[in-house]
Image (cartoon, grey):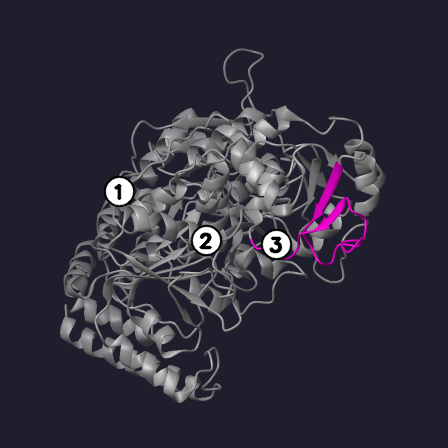
Amino acid sequence: MGRSGPAAQGADAFVTLLSIVLPAYKVQGYLRECLDSILDQGFDDVELIAVDDRSPDHCGEIFDEYAARDPRVKVLHLPQNVGLGEARNAGLAKAVGEYVWFVDTDDTLTPGSLDKIATALREQAPDVLMVDFERTYPIGRAKRSGLRRTLAAAAGPNGADLHARPGLIKTIHTVWNKIVRRDLLAKLDLKFAPGWYEDVSWTYPLLVGAERIFTLEEVCYAYRQRRQGAITRTVNPRHLEVFTHWERAWELIDLQGSRADPVRPALFARMIWHLMQTVGNDDRLPPNLRKQSFLRTAEMFARYLPEGGFAPPGGADGLRYRLVAKRSYGLYAAMRTALRVQRKARGAAGALRKDPGEGRTRLSLFARAYYGLQRRLPLDPNLAGYAAYWYREVSCNPAAVEQAARRIAPHVRGVWIVGKDASVPAGTTHVVEGSRAYYRLLARAKYLVNNVNFPDFVRKRPGQVHLQTHHGTPVKAMGLDEQYFPAGEKHNFAALLRRSDRWDFSVSANAHSTEVWERVYPCAFESLESGFPRNDRLALAGAAESAAARAALGIPADETVVLYMPTSRPEPLALPPFDPATLAAALGPRGRVLVRGRLVPGVDSPDPQVQDVSGYPVVEDLYLAADILVSDYSSVIFDFAVLDRPIVLHAPDWAEYRAARGASLDVIEHAPGPVTRSFPELLSLLGDGGAYADSERRQAFRDRFCAWEDGHAAERVVRRVFLGEQVTPPRQLPPR
């Protein structure tokens, strides 16, 4: 590891150039992306102080995983949750770098940024280095901040301080775009105070105390604009804590004596501007606290008004300042109302210019009216509507949940939604898509369970509970990630998020799935990391169940059965070469190849050792009947692994597939067994009498992805959703 800087302790001890402090709390969906953005830059003169702020999700485990394979990562597990400010302090206390950078763990660094920053730190030796950033959004391209001109104006061979460049006060007050000399923090005795807006009482005293502020115009930081979980988009009385932090900021600034005097007017203007951003923000303060916030701003105005007065700016901001100075809340409220009416009028005019049918599911007038009428009637608290695969069948996780509900929550009546041509098992209570009963069920059932999304016209009612079970562990890019790959689904991503906003619960088979779902569907659901309900049958199956599955398929007990189940390929990709008859011959006279996939070449082979099971209705029977699974990037590998039987990944086109379709997991790195890159290699492997049985890799795969599969996943889901119980699954593999 490269080192630089003066000796820390003794002649041979050197400090790291840069310590990056990474506090984490409930950011498991974004944490790997953050860590990879730092560690994958090939920059060694850095240490990562990873602070697990007693996060209730997988953040601590992710930190430990990265630390186990990278010595630059040092993990600090706090015994209790202390909040962002105190977590940063804890990380700072462990840092040894000349400079320290506090990075938020739901954000990322841009490629190459560490080399640029290191060059600036070594060549310029600043007290503070400020970098530019971009805002990234759930949908669409990133947008560069408006700091470019301000940072360019502050550039100079010897840096600047606030006396020379008071305009720097107007830059964003967050800590994550500032790399700071650690000695300066010690000199100023500057630590983070608890509470929201902790950046305020740290940043402004720091900038006043820094004598050499340099700026880097390059974009080095990607600031994620989150739909859920961001404090700036949370209506909460805690936004009043901004006043406490400004009071603390002034206390710390006053300790620096006359150094602060020349910049007091600019700091005062920034404070009033910032406080008014809170007073008038509908996304932050509850309406009943708005007057209190305004009057407290007026008190701050009077208390910190610089000697000689203050010249307010022009325009609406200047009018707000004058109203605050006079404590005229009535006039302020009237002005605010007028501005809101004006904005709504502009918004309505814009909406009229759009296609009035844009984004709506087309329903007949009768269907829309009938559904609307039913929505006015009371919910049935004991009614659940189930659906799977766009109403095509009765199967998958919803079927397993319904079966468990009949046993554990019998008071909940289950009704399935199916299409007109769907095959429905005998005795299944159901309604047909498009019927009156269909709209009535969607409108009045308290529980709606699906492994995909319900149509756009469905509007979630107060009191309704939507359970999204999903239908596989993700390997390919899903949800919002698909927008970045040429062969990803071309969703209307705004509509996709509106549909996903209906979810109350999201079932997850493993920690990987939980992380992915929370990132690619950034909505306010509760993750149910329970295992997959449909896999309960596999987890509890024994020899008798496997024998019955073989009998149902007409397979003798003494045959070696290979099940080939590849995932589909998006155009222009095609399935790699595969000849089931040749593979069957390689297995010997007691071998059989089951093929599930109508596009597989040779699936219709007349060879008696080849069996097309593409239309077989119960996929779990196929798993139970097979001795070996051959697949690729399909989620079936996670289900089959529950059986603890050999799995071979046949992946000749992994690079092409990943580039075109994207991947949420490097399935080759985590493969549950051997990986073949050509059909001859696959033939050689399977004809080699057991070389495919890589039990060590399979066990590691099962530990990571099947830890919840103990046969009780459906029960856990039913107890949480229908009975309201808090259920924690045991994190261990059941014996097989």
Q: Mark 3 — residue?
A: 616
| x and y percentages locating residue 625 in the rendered image | 61, 40
Residue 98 horizontal side relative to residue 723, left or right? right
Quadrant the N terminus occupies = top right
Under mark 1, the amino acid is: Asp
Mark 1 neighbour class, 10 Å CA radius: few under 14, some 14 to 19, many 20 or more: some
Q: Secondary structure at mark 2?
A: loop
Q: Mark 1 — residue?
A: 254
Under mark 3, the amino acid is: Tyr
Residue 372 horizontal side relative to residue 152, left or right? left
Asked if residue 352 is positioned above or below residue 11 in the image, the reply reads below
Mark before the other along the chain sequence, 3 or 1 = 1
- Give the residue drawn at x 45%, y 79%: 360
> Foreground: 522 or 551?
551
Mark 2 neighbour class, 10 Å CA radius: few under 14, some 14 to 19, many 20 or more: some
- Give the residue drawn at x 46%, y 63%: 453
Q: Mark 2 — residue?
A: 165
Asked if residue 94 is positioned above or below residue 318 in the image, the reply reads above
| x and y percentages locating residue 293 in the rendered image | 18, 60
Asked if residue 364 is positioned above or below residue 553 in the image, the reply reads below
Mark before the other along the chain sequence, 2 or 1 = 2
* Residues in magenta, as a range: 591-617
- Give the residue drawn at x 15%, y 71%: 329
Q: Secondary structure at mark 1?
A: helix
Residue 360 seen by the camera: yes
Query: Distance between the Cα atoms at labels 2 and 1?
Result: 20 Å
Query: Distance between the Cα atoms at labels 3 and 1?
Result: 77 Å
Residue 268 horizontal side relative to residue 293, left or right? right
Q: Residue 203 lies in what quarter of the image?
A: top left
| x and y percentages locating residue 426 in the rendered image | 44, 60
